[in-house]
Image (spheres, rainbow, N blue to C red):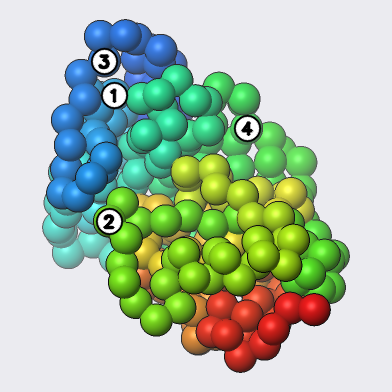
């Protein structure tokens, strides 16, 4: 219990440390931007500054903990605690001056996610979850929506930087929904997509190609808000899987059936 309290204290300190750097560089016309593998897969000096601040905040309290972070990779140790960090989820948005981006940090113990925080400092929204204790937005408990049918739902998705030509790929699945009039948004931040499912703003989220730092915090937040998260086959989800479906639980099986073209929307 005491360890969890200490971890949560450090988690909140770390997301704020990252957010300080996001505020500092935001809308800076001289922001340094480079490109990683693929097209428009940007990384900025703000990503690096945020990551450095986050890691320093964690290591000041827990110097022996395992760290997995998007930009610097693994700092592997024998610790049973792993911190999974995205210093800016939504870098394209951030670098373009669009305030739909966030610091995202998940805390894993012995392979189980136990804490998650996603913080967007530009609209002052801090999502926080602790396993078994519920999910919160700015200290107010949140719950998923109660929509029961996909046709009446508001969905969100994302696309890989390089289009993957696969069966039931991102564009084919997207078309399946929009041709039937189902609103499908694309915010550009998987962490925020998940949190907005948790808060009942979206009824479901699906994406074909994600990394652990994109979802580690957000998927726990969805589950603690009463939602359901699986892979695209409906199997139990791990942030080390690429494909994800997260919903309010009520539309989950139907959404998966539409994704796999096993059901046609009316």
Q: In which quarter of the image is residue 165?
A: bottom left
Q: CB atoms at circles 4 and 3 under 8 Å apart?
A: no
**First of labels 3, 2 by sequence position:** 3
**In the figure, is residue 160 to the left or right of 232?**
left
**First of labels 4, 2 by sequence position:** 4
Q: Indicate which label's residue lies in the foreground, 1 or 4.
A: 1
Q: CB atoms at circles 1 and 3 under 8 Å apart?
A: yes
Q: Can residue 5 be seen in this view?
A: no
* Residue at the image point whose x is 17% and y is 64% from the top: 78
Q: What element carries label 2?
A: loop
Identify the disc placed on residue 46: 1
Q: Indicate which label's residue lies in the foreground, 1 or 3.
A: 3
Q: Indicate which label's residue lies in the foreground, 4 or 2.
A: 2
| Up/down of 50 relative to 109, above or below | above
Q: CB atoms at circles 1 and 4 under 8 Å apart?
A: no
**Real-space CA distance between mark 3 and mark 2, rounded to the nearest whole angstrom:** 24 Å
**First of labels 1, 3 by sequence position:** 3
**Real-space CA distance between mark 1 and mark 4, rounded to the nearest whole angstrom:** 19 Å
Which residue is denoted by mark 2 in the rendering?
A: 162
């Amino acid at each position: 219990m005491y360890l969890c309290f200490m971890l949560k204290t450090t988690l909140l300190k770390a997301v704020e440390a990252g957010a300080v750097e996001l505020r500092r560089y935001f809308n800076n016309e001289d922001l340094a931007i480079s490109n990683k593998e693929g097209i428009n897969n940007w990384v900025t000096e703000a990503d690096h500054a945020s990551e450095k601040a986050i890691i320093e905040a964690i290591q000041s309290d827990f110097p022996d903990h395992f760290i997995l972070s998007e930009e610097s990779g693994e700092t592997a140790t024998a610790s049973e605690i792993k911190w999974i960090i995205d210093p800016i989820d939504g870098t394209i948005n951030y670098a373009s001056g669009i305030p739909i981006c966030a610091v995202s940090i998940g805390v894993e113990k012995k392979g189980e996610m136990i804490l998650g925080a996603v913080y967007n400092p530009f609209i002052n929204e801090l999502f926080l979850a602790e396993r078994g204790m519920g999910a919160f937005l700015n200290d107010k408990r949140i719950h998923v929506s109660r929509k029961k049918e996909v046709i009446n739902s508001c969905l969100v998705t994302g696309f890989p930087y390089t289009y993957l030509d696969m069966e039931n790929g991102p564009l084919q699945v997207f078309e399946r929904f929009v041709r039937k009039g189902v609103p499908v948004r694309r915010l550009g931040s998987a962490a925020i997509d998940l949190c907005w499912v948790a808060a009942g703003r979206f009824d479901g989220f699906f994406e074909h190609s994600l990394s652990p730092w994109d979802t580690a915090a957000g998927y726990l937040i969805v589950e603690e808000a009463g939602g359901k998260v699986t892979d695209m086959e409906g199997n139990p989800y791990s942030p080390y899987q690429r494909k994800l479906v997260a919903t309010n639980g009520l539309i989950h099986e139907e959404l998966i059936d539409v994704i796999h073209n096993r059901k046609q929307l009316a």
